[in-house]
Image (cartoon, rainbow, N blue to C red):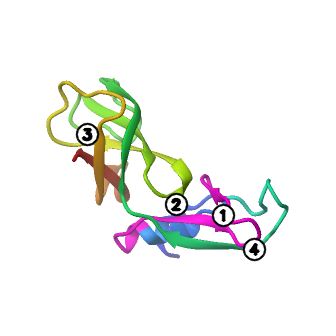
Amino acid sequence: MSIASELATGAEAPFWQGLLDGKLALQRCKGCERWHWPAVWRCSACGSWEHVWEDVAMRGEIYTWTRNWHPFGGLEALEKPFLIVVVKLDGAHGARLMGILEGETTDVAVGQKVTGRVAQTPYADRSVPAIRWSRA
């Protein structure tokens, strides 16, 4: 069993595989072209069951953020505090993704431009792919 299939709990297996391949892929309906994140089996807009996965640039702006001091279960290896950001992607019709902000974390503000990269994040007894963001 691949780590992508271990991480996927539903329709999002191609998302995890994309991260393993070093890219961001999001789901898009073939019927109405609506972007979906989280991934779905059936489009809520047009009812189509057909979707494609398209590569999306890891660029956007900070939609919201929080500084975390809590040692979440499995993430004890992350140095605390760390900054969690929700990023509104420039592509994918404003879909939003979470991740950790790297680098300087003072003076962080909603609307700041960020770029992402795929990194391995320690979780429990393994490393999992995740997007790390940095200010552009």
According to the picture, the residue beneath numbered tag 3 turns out to be: 78
Q: Nearer the viewer, mark 4 or mark 1?
A: 4
Earlier in the chain: of badge 4 and badge 3, it is: 4
Q: Which of marks 3 and 1 is in front?
A: 1
Q: Looking at the image, which residue is at 30% across and 23% down?
A: 69
According to the picture, the residue beneath numbered tag 2 turns out to be: 7
Task: Give the camera-side residue of 79 and 63.
Answer: 63
Callout 2 crowding tier (Cα within 10 Å): few <14, some 14–19, many ≥20? some
Earlier in the chain: of badge 4 and badge 2, it is: 2
Residue 95, horizontal then vertical, whole percent = 53, 49
- Magenta-colored span: 19-39
> What is the spatial separation of the Cα atoms under label 4 and label 1, in whole angstroms?
12 Å
Residue 26 shown in magenta: yes
Q: Nearer the viewer, mark 1 or mark 2?
A: 1
Q: Farthest residue in the right direction?
A: 47
In the image, which disc is placed on residue 11? 1
Which type of secondary structure does the marked residue at label 3 adopt? Answer: loop
Q: Looking at the image, which residue is at 14% across and 35% down?
A: 104
Callout 3 crowding tier (Cα within 10 Å): few <14, some 14–19, many ≥20? few
Residue 67, horizontal then vertical, whole percent = 31, 25
Q: Which of marks 4 and 2 is in front?
A: 4
Residue 45, horizontal then vertical, whole percent = 79, 55
Q: Which amino acid does label 1 sit on?
A: Ala
> What is the spatial separation of the Cα atoms under label 1 and label 2, in whole angstroms?
11 Å
> What is the spatial separation of the Cα atoms under label 3 and label 2, in whole angstroms?
20 Å
Q: Do the residues labelled 4 and 2 touch (CB within 8 Å)?
A: no
- 67 vs 105, left or right, is right
According to the picture, the residue beneath numbered tag 4 turns out to be: 50
Earlier in the chain: of badge 4 and badge 1, it is: 1
> What is the spatial separation of the Cα atoms under label 3 and label 1, in whole angstroms?
28 Å
Callout 1 crowding tier (Cα within 10 Å): few <14, some 14–19, many ≥20? few
Which type of secondary structure does the marked residue at label 2 adopt? Answer: helix
